[in-house]
Amino acid sequence: MRGSKAGRSLFIASFLAPSVVLYGLFVVWPFLQTFYLSVFRFRGVSSKKTYVGTQYFEALTKDDVFLQCLKNVGFLLVVGGGVVLIVSIALAHALQSKGPMAKFLRSVYLFPQVISVVAVAVLWRFIYQPQGGLLNGILKPLGIMPPENGWLGSTTSALPSVTVAWIWLSLGFYTMLFAAGLKGIPEEVNEAAALEGVTGWRKFWAITWPLLWSIKRVAVVYIVINVMNVFGLVYVMTQGQPARKTETLLTYLYEQSILNSKFGYAAALATFNFVVILVITLVVMLMFRRDPQAARS
């Protein structure tokens, strides 16, 4: 028996080893290197590094651009993430019906997921374009005038405009996630609810919402990760402008590392980003435990 267990363990380990090695080499090791570089002044042009300790992390607390990045990411997380959750749940419910509208939604709701982020950014730049843009073409006949510097050029409308683009890009994935969760609810539960006369909002809050608990946890964690790591969409649409009002942590990290060769400071930004994602993820996992009653206690 012991020999068979050892042979089985060795067999499993032989299949897992390549994946573990690759993960360690291309994920864990770069993370450790980033943490290491965050305490050194390193410009990337030579191997010379000067130890600075926590100097860069202290500098972050006084960096106005960094603080603006946190505000922008917070807006994107609360507003954009909240809208994505609400709308994706509604779309997932719509996909469960058998009417022509549901068939149409099934054919188009994943469209943003099959095109590149750069293409999405270029598309939305065209929509927001001051001259000849689709949005202005719709709003001007209605008497609604755009901001003076355009939707992406105004400090008040740039971030909400980017948020709308991010919502459009993200909806398909989360709709698919919630649709899978709704499909996983046993048909007997729905039949029992129908027999008891529980329908509409009452059914949603009493049955559907609690049974989607694990799906909600996964969705919120993914939203946190995606928002904290948003880069391509913002960089192509605005490059963090105007006046840093759309700057994110990763666009600022790119500026500090690639453009300014401040790799130590950029590593500190990356380390902060990783720690924030880890902490928020742990909080979310704690809040969305499997048993809703235990989560409220």
Image: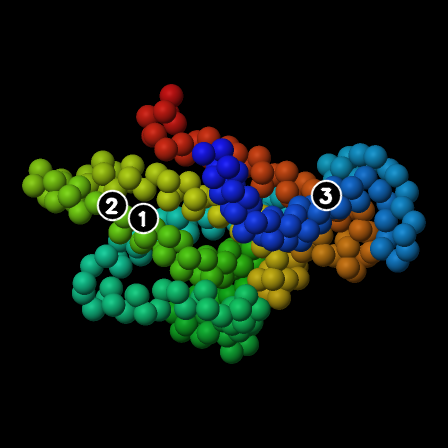
Residue 232 image offset from top left, x and y in percent = 60, 62
Query: What's under tag 1, amino acid-wise?
Result: Gly
Q: Which residue lies furthest to the top in this view?
A: 297
The quadrant of the rendering that contains the C terminus is top left
Q: Is mark 1 on a helix, strand or loop?
A: helix
| Label 2 neighbour load within 10 Å: few <14, some 14-19, many 20+ | some
- Report the residue marked by disc 3: 32
Q: How far apart are marks 1 and 2 (CA)?
A: 7 Å
Query: What's under tag 2, amino acid-wise?
Result: Ile
Mark 3 against mark 1, which lies toward the viewer? 3
Q: How far apart are marks 2 and 3 (CA)?
A: 41 Å
- Above or below, 296 against 211 in this view is above
| The quarter of the displayed image where residue 13 is located | top right
Q: Are marks 1 and 2 in contact (CB under 8 Å)?
A: yes
- Report the residue marked by disc 2: 185
Q: Do the residues labelled 2 and 3 touch (CB within 8 Å)?
A: no
Q: Distance between the residues labelled 3 and 1?
A: 36 Å
Q: Is mark 3 on a helix, strand or loop?
A: helix
- Report the residue marked by disc 1: 181
Q: Earlier in the sequence, mark 3 or mark 1?
A: 3
Residue 17 image offset from top left, x and y in percent = 60, 49
